Structure formats: structure tokens, C-alpha cells
Image (cartoon, rainbow, N blue to C red):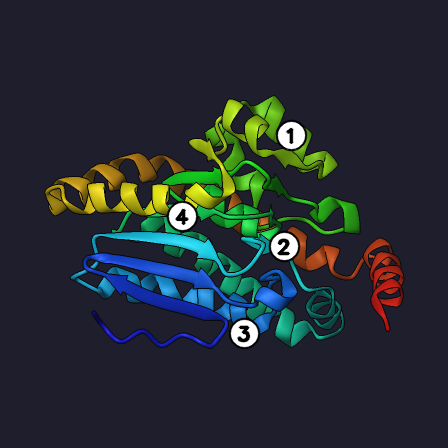
Amino acid sequence: MSTYRVPDEIQVESDGPIRIVRLNRPDDLNATNHVLHQGIAELWPQIDLDLEARAVVLTGNGRAFSAGGDFHYIDELSRDPVLRKESLTHGKQIVTGMVSCRVPIIAAVNGPAVGLGCSLVALSDIAYMAESAHLADPHVLVGLVAADGGPITWPLLTSMMLAKEYALTGDRIPAERAAAIGLVNHVLPDDEVFEAALGCAKKIASLPPQAVEDTRRVMNLHMQRAVVATIDYALTAENRSFDSAELRANLDRMLKKSAP
């Protein structure tokens, strides 16, 4: 296996031609901070260059897949425009990196997938979801625009009206509902999700690699067009939303509530 340059917040393991990627902030429900966000952005080009890799299983350590953005990180971004610009660049790199990666990505959604976690599921090729888990893109609830989230990818996975409903309300999407509307492929008992995703990855990895990679590429050209058409406006809108009075008020309230 190629040597991966990742922070402690990400673990990459090898199982033959399978790369198992684990988000690794279990004490914080794998919520996104700057190090994890940058690490995810820099991961996909490394996987793309790992010529022995045939499939990826993406999951989270602990009880969650990823519980969204760390409120302290969001607070930093709202106050530091330089850090924010870097973070938005990383967001774009996550989307484009996953869409263009030659290696199929299978998500093992072991727990809640919120915010960026929800985006990672939508950008994966196949998703297995724990029956106790849920998806949610709650950016609007705090006053943010989701530049790398549901508004870009969901209209390709489900109906436009359903995508609008969940993007505009931030409502949770239970596992069974997510499968019924096409946002994940399979819902399984919690303790069976990872093995099922790994089994799918091994099946794909056993097939002729060029045929697999080119077939993935053909289908992802549809998503790539959507990304190119929307992401620059979405990034501009998200950047602007960080300066809103609504976000500031919501952050102040949530940080006060979480203070010891």
C-alpha cells in the first residue's frame, strides 16, 4: 500500500486492494474541525494515485459517521476570513476529489451523518446505512449555505422537490426514508453495516479494474457537470453567509449552551 499522509483524525488501513478510511474523532462524534476537513480534502488525490487500490470503504470510528461541523470551528471561520477562504477551498477539493477519484467509494454509514458527513455519503458511489442512523444537512438551521452539500448532489440522487424539502428545512432523514428516496442503497442492522460495505468493496475490487473505473467515470460525468455548474456560486454564497447576523446569534447561543 502507498504511504498516506493523513492526520491522526483520519485512519487509512489496507485490506488487500481495499482501502478502509475511518474518520477518527470519536469523542466528538467525528465532527469536522480544520484538521479533519483539510485531511479529507487531501486524501482523495492520494487514493487516486495509489495504483494498488481498487475500492474504498469510508466509515467513522465510534458511534457516528460524522456529526457535522464542530461549532468552535464554525465560530473560527466566522471570525477569520483567511481561514475561511482556506476551508472553502478544501470544501471544493473534497467535492471535486471524490467525484473525479478513479476508485469506487462505498460508504458504511455507522451512525449519524450530518453536514459534511451527509455530503460524504452523497458523494460516495454506494452507501450502506445503519438502521439507527440518520442523514441531515442542517446548514440553513444555523444560517449557513451548504456549498459542498445536499443542494449540489441531492437533485441527482432523488427528486428535486425532495432535495429542496430536506435542504431548505434541515430535517433529519431516517435511514429507511433515505433508502426509500434513493439517498442510500441499503439499510441494515447496525452491527452488519461495515461488513456489508466491505463485502461490496471486495466484490468490486475483484472485477476488471479498467472496466470498473471507466464505468464509474461515465456515470460521474453527470455529477461533475452539476458540480461545475453550481459550486462556485455555492462557495460565494457560503462565504457570504458566514458574515450574517443570524449565524452569529445562533453560534453565540450554541456555544453558550455547550460551555461547561
Mark 4 → mark 2, Cα distance in angstroms? 18 Å
Quarter in which the C terminus is drawn: bottom right
Give the number of the mark in front: 1 or 4: 4
Residue 60 location (% of width, % of height)? 49, 57
Give SS at disc 3.
Answer: helix
Mark 2 → mark 3, Cα distance in angstroms? 15 Å
The residue that mark 3 highlights is 35
Q: Earlier in the sequence, mark 3 or mark 4?
A: 3
Instruction: Name the residue rendered at 88%, 63% in the picture.
Output: 257
Callout 1 environment at 10 Å: few (<14), some (14 to 19), or many (20+)?
some
Q: Earlier in the sequence, mark 1 or mark 4?
A: 1
The residue that mark 4 highlights is 194
Give the number of the mark in front: 4 or 2: 4
Instruction: Name the residue rendered at 52%, 64% in the picture.
Output: 89
Q: Is residue 15 left or right of residue 133?
A: left
Give the number of the mark in front: 3 or 4: 4
